Amino acid sequence: NTGGATAPARRNTPLMLAHRQANDVLHLKGELINELLSEVERLRAAVEGHESRERQLRAELRGSQAQEQEQRQSAQLQSTGLQQLRTETARSVKRHAQEAKRREELLTARAVAAEETLQSVRAEQRTQLERKDAALRTAQAQARTLQRKIDNAELAKRNEAFVSQSAHASCGQPAWLASLGAGATPTPPSLTAPEPPEPPSEGTSRARHATPETIAPPVPEEGTEARHVPLSLAQQQRAFIDGLGQGL
């Protein structure tokens, strides 16, 4: 019996070894599978991280592209605006230059017109002054002529008065009165009042019987006219005309 029991135990030993080896292999395979699964998970996580990074990079790239596009558009707009500004500036400069030229021409024309007007006014004033001067000279000449006429009239009146007084003083005819009839220039009579007649004397008697040529008009003393005769009407008129000429 003891020998019979030992034989099955010997037969089960390789089986157990095989079974143990199989368990070991299964255990190793399980560990390997677990490691592979862990590696797969790690790789999957790494892939997901790479994909996330790739999406982030793509988003950043799209943002950069959008920003670049925006910058390009902004640069284009700025370039367009700068070109428009240059065009408007050139037009404004040209317009201002034309306006300045027109203003200069207008001011020049106004200056020329003002100069011509000034010259015309000066010429007119000069003409008026010449006319006034000529009128003044004419008035002075007329005044002198009138004064001469007045003086001649006064002289004639005084001559007549002197003749009348001489006629009352003597019956003879003076030589200067006789010269009036001959057309000669008479000697001016005295401008002072005649002195009263003296009593008849020997000289007076001889003068009464003398010829007209021997009798001469009385000669006034020096300064007598200026002392005794006031300003006549003709002299007053002459002074008024001279004052009027100085006022003009």
Image (spheres, grey):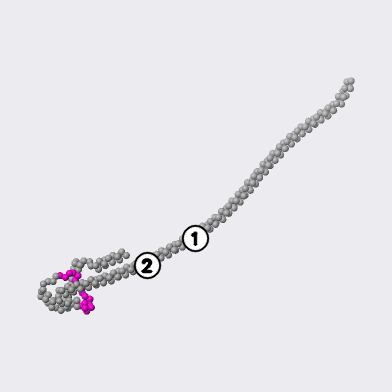
Residue appearing at x 75%, y 35% in the figure? 36
From the image, which quarter does the C terminus lie in?
bottom left
- Quarter holding residue 148: bottom left
Give residue 185's position: percent from left, percent from top. 22, 76
Which sits earlier in the primary sequence, circle 2 or circle 1?
1
Of circles 2 and 1, the one toward us is 2
Is residue 191 one of those drawn in magenta? yes
Q: Is residue 32 above or below residue 113?
A: above
In depth, the one of 166 and 105 nearer the eye is 166
Determine which residue is flagged by label 1: 102
Q: Which residues are magenta?
A: 179-195
Pick the front one: 223 or 69 = 223
* Residue 113: x %, y % from top left: 44, 63
Secondary element type, mark 1: helix
Residue 161 visible in the picture: yes
Q: In the visual, does 9 lie left or right of 45?
A: right
Rendering coords of residue 188 (x, y %): 21, 73
Query: At x 84% / y 28%, what residue is drawn?
Result: 15
Residue highlighted by disc 2: 127
How far across and down, in percent of the image, does residue 47 sit?
71, 39
Is 149 situated left or right of 98 in this image? left
The kind of residue tagged 1 is Arg
Principal SS element in the magenta part?
A: loop
Residue type at mark 2 is Thr
Up/down of 218 relative to 9, above or below: below
Number of dots carrying numbers: 2
Contact (CB < 8 A) between labels 2 and 1? Answer: no
Task: Confirm whether the magenta stretch covers residue 185.
Answer: yes
